[in-house]
Amino acid sequence: MKKYLIIAWRNLWRNKRRTMITIASVFFALFLALLMRSMQHGTYNLMEKDAIRNSTGFIQVHAPGYWEDKTIDNTFVNSHKLITEVNAVGNISQVIPRLESFALASSGNITKGIGIVGTIPDIENSITKLTNRVTEGQYFISNNDNGLLVGEDLAKYLEIKVGDTIVLLSQGFHGITAAGEYPVRGILHFPAPEMNKQLIYMTLSAAQYFYAADNRVTSYSIMLNEPDKLDKTYNKLAASLGKNYEIMPWNEMMVELKQQIESDNISGIFMLAILYVVVAFGIFGTILMMTHERRREFSVMIAIGMQRYKLALIVFLETIYMGFIGVIMGALGALPIVYYFFINPIPLQGEMAKAMEEFNVQPILPFALEGSIFFSQGVVVLILTTIIAFYPLINIGKFSLINGLRG
């Protein structure tokens, strides 16, 4: 076998032009496939990072019925024992207790309905990096801070700035009237316009006091060490907590985002399939040309005693060699481009930017630098090349020796 490998390698460089044309076909196949899939996976990772981490988390724990009826009465007691039970499931990096509800915000003669998120500042910031969104003022001073962080468009609407006071009015736990005056600690900027227009952050202790919901929360937002194991972690958590709580994964809470990712992935795979079909015909064309150009050479070798199956094996190995070289060069060619856009994402504008912002995702187009993408696409291109390599193998076994010598 070693002898055939050496002969096949030497045959490649007897006609460098023909060899380079074939290698170039494989190179561009992998090069374009890697750029396309890297861009898609980068977008999905960004959606996961921004939309999921900044809102629901990968999994949420609620009181039974909360998701259908989001009232302050559908809360549960926040206990250290419960958090310990959740963490015991494994694959959980962080649990964020939150108390979320609605209120009427007033400043002077201006009022507006807003959403309130009560959270523990240290834990919240470790996951969502909320401090990076503060454009004016400062983040919460402590976990017991009584101030507010206000979305920038909401602050403009209420005509307030850092240091001003907002009056909040709502319905608290079990119908108690919730009212209070709170200073504006900082102004936040979110990618999603709706969050800028109607969201206020409070510390969890301040929100619990405001709603008279002592030590109660509406949800635990759970972050995972390995998001790929979402289903396994969800099943364990549901089995552990039983029927006392409502457990929901992000894809049930954010159906629109899930559908967008799935539809985009399907369309991406479809476009990739078209690319592979086009490229496969390109590779096949070069192999077809090579086979017919060498028919006289093959005929002479068979005429002087070369067995057809040995000749077919050598030609097959030549094609595999060219496939491997093309794949390696394609990966090396795509790597610096993928790396550059991994570090420097492409900024989006217009309708595409607005579509991203609606899901609280930065309007950028990042690339994913993942070894699995390079490996999977390289394998696909090699499989295509291997399938095409059977053509000269079949052709050598069937062509007429007399016609080949005359050719």
Image: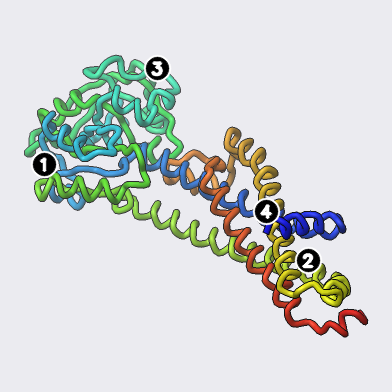
Q: Tell me the distance, in whole angstroms, between the alpha carbons under discs 1 and 2.
A: 70 Å
At label 3, counting other C-alpha atoms closer than 10 Å, the crowd grade (few under 14, some 14-19, many 20 or more) is: some
Determine the image quadrant of residue 178: top left
Depth check, mark 4 against mark 1: the one in front is: 4
Q: Name the residue tied to disc 3.
A: 137
Residue sitting at 74 percent across and 72 percent down?
Answer: 392
- Amino acid on which the number 2 mark rests in the picture: Thr
Which badge, 3 or 4, is on the more N-terminal residue? 3
Tag 4 secondary structure: helix
Which badge, 4 or 1, is on the more N-terminal residue? 1
Q: Name the residue tied to disc 4.
A: 324
Q: Is residue 389 above or below residue 75?
A: below
* Mark 3–mark 4 CB contact (< 8 Å): no
Which of the numbered marks, if any, corresponds to residue 286?
Answer: 2
Depth check, mark 2 against mark 3: the one in front is: 2
Give the image location of residue 31, x and y in percent.
67, 51
